[in-house]
């Protein structure tokens, strides 16, 4: 069967570094195996899910380079879930339970006090028709539990290796609430069946759901897919990432000037033995991608490391890849300017700063008036190219006797107003003679 994977966020928020990594793994897996990648919007929670968040998720994915994914929405599929419920009721695998949350909590406390695991005791299975009628006459409504077969469930996890879970140690999961709404399990499995999902790749926060889900696939007469559970991201301090931290939201990273490919390269190599290196396209990440390379330990997502990677990415970025964005930012100078400044950028927006330095008006800083005046006199006539700087600075050195820092420091401050920056050899022809001359004379230009 053709590989089919899905990324299944709930549209109750935007993507953050953690679920973006899950999306990326699924996409890379599909690419690597010539398969399909689906976006499944888990929007059964009508109160918290919004179209604005769904649109935000699409936008975040598109920014990453995961564009035009086929999409399925759970809210379109309630009829299908109803049919699955009927099937499970008919086969005796779904049973009504009437305990209130308080009653369940009390049971759990008693079990724990007796040193027993807090597993649901299946008291509801012992209710007679008359008991149920009585409870319902009192106004109670049932929630519905999936009857687990009490046996060992085994799967070969694509990341964690062989997993064994004794289903007798688990509570029968609730699939349908008192008010008829679904918990995540049943819609997820019914969709995975109908969409022909062959591999479920998700965070290890879902490992505990897998054994019941495998039994649910079987109860719906379907072959369970393969599962791979990747470890979760932690911050540089080793603490779990907070979903509320806006700087870790995709839109936050983007607003902070981080390039999509830097984030993708970082997220895809974190937790693997591969060196973290910037890639020029998502496709370039495909050959090296292998779930088996992922460590089971939590992966450390360090915003500082990401910023450094972002800078490395920009330093190697060819002009063509960025020309449109520079144009939109009002940055001119073409390829010559880009090549002069890219090595000095931490984020692309810094290019604008250097463009304003080149174009002016800029207030020069005159650290050595005599030297600057002499330097102005010695400026050669145009046309200028990258060789002007070497010849001119040598002439200034000769005429003033200044060398090293005492020579280059004042020239840079006068020409750019800054102590450091891109090579003057490259900047000088872009500053042009008229502005260079004025700045060396201490005039704003
Ligand atoms: N909506 C679930 C989540 O975001 C999907 C989990 C799954 O991939 O099965 O956690």
Image: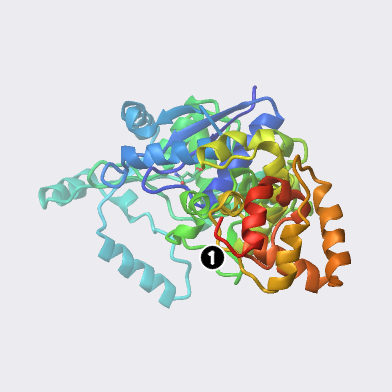
Q: Secondary structure at mark 1?
A: loop
Where does the N terminus fall, quadrant-wise? top right
Classify residue 198 by image quadrant: top right
Rendered location of residue 130, percent (x, y): 18, 46
Q: Residue at x 76, y 53 (%)?
A: 379
Question: Which residue is at the front of the view, 136 or 431?
Answer: 431
Classify residue 30 by image quadrant: top right
For disc 1, does the CB lie below 8 Å from ligand 1? no
- The residue carrying mark 1 is 240
Q: Is residue 191 visible?
A: yes
Q: Residue at x 59, y 54 (%)?
A: 350
Rendered location of residue 141, percent (x, y): 20, 47
Rendered location of residue 252, percent (x, y): 47, 54
Question: Which residue is at the front of the view, 314 or 171?
Answer: 314
Q: Residue at x 45, y 31 (%)?
A: 191
Q: Residue at x 86, y 59 (%)?
A: 395
């Amino acid at each position: 069967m053709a590989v089919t994977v899905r990324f299944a966020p709930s549209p109750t928020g935007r993507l953050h570094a953690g679920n973006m990594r899950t999306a990326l793994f699924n996409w890379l897996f599909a690419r690597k195996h010539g398969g399909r990648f689906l976006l499944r919007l888990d929007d059964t929670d009508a109160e918290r899910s919004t179209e604005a968040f769904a649109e935000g998720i699409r936008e975040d994915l598109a920014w990453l380079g995961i564009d035009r994914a086929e999409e399925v929405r759970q809210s379109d599929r309630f009829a299908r879930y109803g049919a699955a419920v009927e099937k499970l009721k008919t086969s005796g695998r779904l049973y009504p339970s009437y305990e209130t949350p308080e009653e369940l909590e009390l049971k759990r406390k008693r079990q724990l006090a007796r040193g027993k695991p807090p597993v649901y005791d299946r008291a509801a299975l012992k209710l007679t028709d008359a008991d149920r009628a009585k409870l319902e006459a009192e106004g109670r409504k049932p929630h519905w539990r999936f009857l687990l077969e009490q046996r060992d469930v085994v799967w070969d996890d694509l990341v964690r290796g062989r997993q064994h879970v004794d289903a007798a140690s688990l509570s029968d999961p609730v699939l349908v609430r008192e008010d008829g709404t679904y918990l995540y399990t049943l819609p997820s499995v019914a969709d995975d069946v109908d969409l022909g999902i062959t591999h479920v790749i998700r965070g290890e926060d879902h490992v505990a759901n897998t054994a019941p889900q495998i039994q649910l696939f079987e109860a719906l007469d379907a072959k369970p897919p393969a599962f791979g559970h990747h470890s979760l991201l932690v911050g540089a301090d080793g603490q779990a990432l907070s979903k509320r931290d806006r700087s870790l939201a995709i839109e936050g990273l983007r607003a902070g000037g981080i390039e999509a490919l830097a984030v993708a390269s970082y997220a895809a190599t974190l937790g693997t033995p591969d060196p973290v290196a910037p890639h020029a396209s998502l496709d370039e990440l495909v050959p090296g991608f292998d779930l088996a390379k992922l460590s089971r330990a939590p992966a450390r997502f360090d915003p500082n490391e990401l910023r450094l990677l972002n800078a490395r990415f920009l330093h190697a970025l060819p002009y063509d890849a960025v020309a449109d964005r520079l144009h939109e930012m009002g940055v001119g100078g073409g390829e010559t300017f880009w090549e002069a400044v890219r090595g000095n950028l931490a984020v692309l927006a810094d290019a604008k700063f250097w463009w304003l330095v080149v174009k002016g008006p800029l207030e020069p800083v005159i650290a050595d008036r005599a030297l600057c005046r002499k330097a102005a006199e010695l400026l050669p006539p145009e046309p200028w190219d990258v060789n002007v700087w070497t010849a001119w600075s040598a002439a200034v050195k000769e005429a003033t006797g200044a060398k090293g820092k005492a020579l280059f420091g004042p020239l840079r401050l006068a020409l750019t107003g800054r102590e450091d920056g891109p090579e003057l050899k490259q900047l000088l022809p872009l500053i042009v003679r008229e502005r260079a001359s004025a700045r060396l004379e201490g005039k704003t230009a």
